[in-house]
Each structure stands twice: as structure tokens, then as C-alpha cells.
Amino acid sequence: MNIIIPIKQVPETSNVKMDKETGTMIRDGVVSVINPLDLYAIEAGIQLKEQFGGKVTVLTMGPQAATKALKEAIAMGCDEGILVSDRKFAGADTWATSYTLSEAIKHIGEYDLVLAGERATDGDTGQVGPGIAAWLDIPLATYVSKIDEVTSNNITVERLVEEGYQILELPLPALLTVVKEISNPRLPTLRGKKKARVSEVPIMSAADLQLDDARIGLKGSPTKVVKIGYPKVTRGGKIVTAVGEEGTNEAVEGLIKFLESKELI
Amino acid sequence: MKYNLVTLEIVEELKRICGPKNVFSDEEKMEAYSHDETNAAEYGHMPEVVVTPTTAEEISQIVKLANRELIPITPRGAGSGLSGGAIPIFGGILLSVEKMNKVLDIDYGNMMITTETGIVTNEINNIIKEKGLFYAGYPMSLETCYLGGNIAENAGGGKAVKYGVTGKYIMGMELVTPTGDIVHLGGKLSKDVTGYDLKQLIVGSEGTLGIVTNATIRLTGLPTAKSTLLVLYKTPKDAIDTVPVIMAKGTIPVSMEFMDKLSVQTACEYLNESLPYQQAGAMLLIEVDGTNQEQVELDAEAIGDLCMENGAIEVYVADNYTTQERIWSVRRNIAEAFKVVSPIQSLEDIVVPISAIPDIIPELDRLSEMYDIKIPCYGHAGDGNLHATLVKNPNHTMEHWHEIEAKALRELYQITKKLGGKISGEHGIGVKRKKYMLENMDPVELSLMKGIKKAWDPNYIMNPGKMFDLE
């Protein structure tokens, strides 16, 4: 089974500071890591390879420094990393990014499955995975929490939806975006690290992929950021106070009714 | 020792000294000050009044009042101690430094910071990080504990293998003595042999020789790169046997933490973490730091290779914050996890010469079998400091537990002593280990300590009943 996993490098977000004026993240001195939600896709991919054999290729679009993320994925157990990198790709929105990545995937060749994280923790759109599926014109299942069965032609998955689970059978090749319920990402091993260090990461440029300048990077991006604002926090806790036995009973009843109204009990 | 009670008049006088806001005696509020991280049911004791002064002068007046009225004073930091050092076992005045958390001076020229002692230890690093500086003290409770408590206990923790313990970084301090005088010890000096080194006497004195109100700490350059290994072994012995091998090879890791299977499993279940512990009898968490990421990773790899050559079954590598936090979080949460699973336990911190660590493991197994209790073992293998923890068997009655706890501890301490070790490496004696220190210490050494206490605290009001009893 040949699996391709597009991943993203994101700023490590445990200690991120925002620029109050521009509304953007201060990226100076912030370390980049593999998008935490992509780790679940990587783990799911490695597990499928362990079960069915084949090859796992990780793919990312970014500057040369993004090689580090690819090598980390190789250290976890992926077979190959490919960097899609070109100055012309800079400023790409999710439209241009998914187009570029889909072209890179076509360039890689035969594949059975594309696995992506649910979304990136920086942009938070969740659009690139589905976008790639659209450009490749292959079936898509988002929010996949479990892979039930894989046959030579089909894959059966469980999707996490608001009301519960939805079971879908998709013909292969297909693209899945996965949620964290699907796997527990493993840590890179020392053997994996050593393998990653000596592994060559090929670079695909715009020219290699024969891409039209008008469809990539800033030029190819229809999204325009008009304004960045801070959301208002509308959630608020409610403190139920109770005086005396009667008051307590009333408060408890009120709480039960509230929880029932929310279908929590 | 007979002390007087805190009367209403004394409460009023305390209010005059540090303001009514900083004195309280209602039970509900005082409860939080009646225990530390030791078992409250066993060691807890209510104070009669709690004071939260804001200056050394106020503390000086409070201490003088306590001497005059013969009322015991118990100094307190964040209350995260593990030996009962901050528990007011005779009631009296509980003096918390929680409101004294100001940074007084950041001296980049001398690479030192002077701060009040109610500051949360981790805050110090947050403040100086931007300037590329670093305070190497790293107690495992760093996100809650105060510098004052670290000094009183001479806190060790997870980075002591390379950086040493708190005392190494304390250059000077302001101290309110047990008689209420304010004195400045040490200073911003790299060398100082002008008389006895009293500041180092205060470090680790468990609040029995005075209250440190501010301290000057030596800083080092901030290590910007680190790499963490999680090494899996079949048996605890395999893991422990590797420690001296690594230490002898040159690159001194920042941390070399040992965790046996029971510890890892309990912490993983508590955190819902999925480290592959099932196949491993023990793990070592090894961290290397420096300023060049590439070099640090190479150093870590060399150590990893060494582990593989010495019986490791797998080596995991964490080179970024996310994966490093994942591993460290397991180690840091072991004690907390055991509190949830089995709240009745005795968390120990015996310390032995590094080369004696392999000998202690089979002894723990023997004790565990003999008394039919679990003894998870984890801790700072790199400096011989192990948290062997006696956990009550749920099938035993409390009466039986108390009986075997004392017996098992006694044996554990005897074994430790035989191997050239001591009963506490970093948690301190407090009330919890007082009788065991008495049993295990050279009487001459003990008598010298008592002599110091008598000279410093003639009325025996400063944190009495801790470490040793005078009579």
C-alpha cells in the first residue's frame, strides 16, 4: 500500500505571543514542529504500512528548513520525505497550497491513499486536505477516527460526526483527514533518527512540477486578508448559590434540569 | 517544650505589624496552611494564626514578638514540601512569604538576580530568558514551589546531574535570624572566605535557623538546545547498570532519570499517555543540553548508542518541545499519579553513591516481597537519588500498614546506610524522617547540629520540632 502524507511545519504553540497591533503571531525565536495533528496521520500511515506493507512518503511545502519536519517523520518510521520548495510558492493560501501539493502528488506517481491531519494548528482552516482531494478528483472522508477495513479496492472508515460515528466505504485511491482518536503517535527512535540523518530529501520546484505561475503562491491565491480581529469571549460560567436545605434542593433540581436540557444526563 | 498560646492581643499586635489584611485566623482559610505534600491526616497540624508579611522589617518584628511571648514560628513557602518542614506542628504563628515575590535586581554584568523568596521558581527563568540567562535550579515542582522553599530544603531535582543543587547558586541572602535580627550573608562574590560560610549553613536548614527574605542567585548562560532520550530496558538492573557507564564517557547529561515499570505504567494511565511500557521493565530518561542543536543531538545519539550496547531494547529520541514535554510529563506526574491510585504511601528520597545504585534495586524487590507492598522506584539515577516509594497494599488494615511502614522504612534506611548513602537526598528531614535521622546519624554530628541550633535560636521558637528534637 503506497501512502502519501502531506504535513505542515507550524510554530510550537505552547508559548506563543501575539502582536496586538497587527493581530499576527510573533514568529521570531519560535521553534517549528510538525503540526501536532499531522502526527496522527503519520502514525496511522505507519501502522497501515506495518500491516499491509508498502511505502509511506511524507510531503511538505515550505522553505528548506522544513526538511527538519520531514526528517522527524522519517525518524518515526516513514520511508521517504519530499520537499516542495520554491520562492514562487510563498504567500500561498489554502487554494494554491492544495493545488501545488496535488500536483506534487501526481508527480510522485502511483498511490493508494493520502492521509492528512484534520487541520493545522496555526491556520486552523482544515481546507488543504479536502482541497487536495478535490484537485486530485478522488473520494474524501474527513474527521476519520478509525480505519475498519482495507481491501485491494476499498477502504472502510469511521467518521467522527456531531451525533456519533458515520461509517463510509470509499474506493481507493482516496484521501482521509484524520482526528486524534485514530492513533497514538509514536516517538522517533534512535535507529529512525540515524536513518533520517543520512536520507536524501528530494526537492520539487515549480519548474519541476511545470506549474503555471498564475496558479501558485500569492498570485494564485484568491484569499485576501482584509482585517484581523480578536473574537469576543461570550462563554461565561454561572455560579449556583444555595442557602439552607431548601435552597440546596432547589439548586440541585435547577442544575439537573439544566443538564437535562443540554442532553448531558 | 512548652509554648504560649496566640492570644487575641497577640493577633492584634501582629495586625499592627503587618496590616490587618496580612493576618488571619479563620479555620477555613488556615486549613491550606496546615499541611504540605505529605499525608495531611498523618502529619498535618493547624496553625493558630497565619501572617503574610511583606517586608523583612515586619518579619523581624514578628520574630521578636514570638521570642518575647514564647510562641513558635513556622516559615512557609508554597507548601509543596515532602517532609513536613512547613507544617506548624506546635500551632503558633505560620509565616508565609507568599506576598514577598518581587524581583529586586537583575545584574547582567555579574550574571546574578536578587529576588524576594516568595517568587515561584519557574518565574525566575521566565524573567531572564530573554537576556539569554538561566537559573539552573530545577525542582520537579518548579511550577508551584517558591525560591524560599528551595533554599530551605536545598532542592535538587531533575537537572542536578550536570548543574548541581540549589545551594550551588545561592551567592547571598538577607536573613531574619531566629532572634529577629536582619543580617546580610554572602554577596555577589565568586570567592569569599571571610569567616564561616553562614549562607551555606542556611541552605538546607529547613527554616530552623531563620527566614530568608531575599536571595542573590548566580545565573548561567541559557542552554538553547537540548535532546531527550527515552531508553527502554528489560530490567531495572539493566537500566541502572548503564548509568555509571554513561557518566564515565564524558558528556554529562543534564538529567538521568530512572523509572521502573510500575511508575511508568501508573503515570501513563493517569495521563492517558501511550508510551510502549508494556515490554519494558524500566526506563531511563536522559537529557543532554548545550547551545548547538546539531552537537547536542550528536551527543545524545552517542549516549543512545552506549545504551544500546549495554542492553537497552529501544531508544526513543525527542528533539523538540512537543515530544520532550510528552516524556517529561510522564516523569513529573509519577508522584501525583500514585496519589490518585493509592493515596496512602511513603515517598522516599534515599541517596547512595552512584556506583551503589545497582545494589539497591534487588533490596527493594526483597522488601516489597517480604512486606507484601508495592515499592515503585523512580528518581534521579544520575546522582544516586531514588524515590523508592512504599505504597500501602489495599488489602492491609491501616494498623498493619503503620506497623510495616515503620519496619520497611527502617530496613530501607539501614540498607542505604550500608551502601554509603543517606536517608534523604532532597526532600529533607522535617517531621517525617526525624526519628530515622536520629537512628542513622553519628551522635557527634547530631550534637554539633544541636549546638548550632541552640546558639542561633535560644528560645527554640524558629520552626521547632523539625529535623531533630533538642531534648
Image: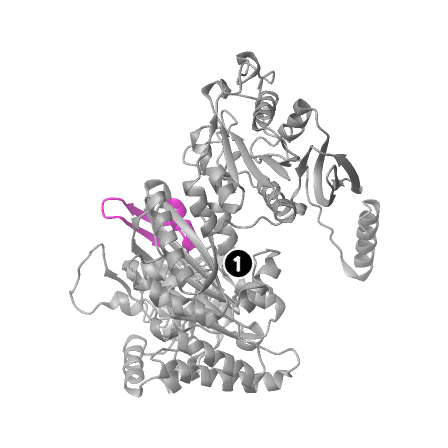
Mark 1, residue position: B330
Q: Tag 1, which secondary structure?
A: helix
Residue at 37% x, 87% y is B471
Residue at 70% x, 44% y is A145
- The percent position of residue B133, horizontal first and vertical second, equals 32, 46
| Amino acid beneath label 1 | Val
Report crowding for label 1: few under 14, some 14 to 19, many 20 or more residues within 10 A (C-alpha).
many
Seen in the image, is A262 located left or right of residue B238? right
- Is residue A261 something one can see in this rendering? yes
* The magenta stretch spans residue B207: no
- Is residue B319 something one can see in this rendering? no
Picture quadrant of residue B132: top left
Residue interval drawn in magenta: B101-127
Residue at 61% x, 48% y is A50
- The percent position of residue B160, horizontal first and vertical second, equals 35, 61
- The percent position of residue B175, horizontal first and vertical second, equals 31, 63
Residue extending farthest to the left is: B194
Chain holding disc 1: B
Q: Judge whether B153 appears above or below A15 on screen.
A: below
Picture quadrant of residue B262: bottom right
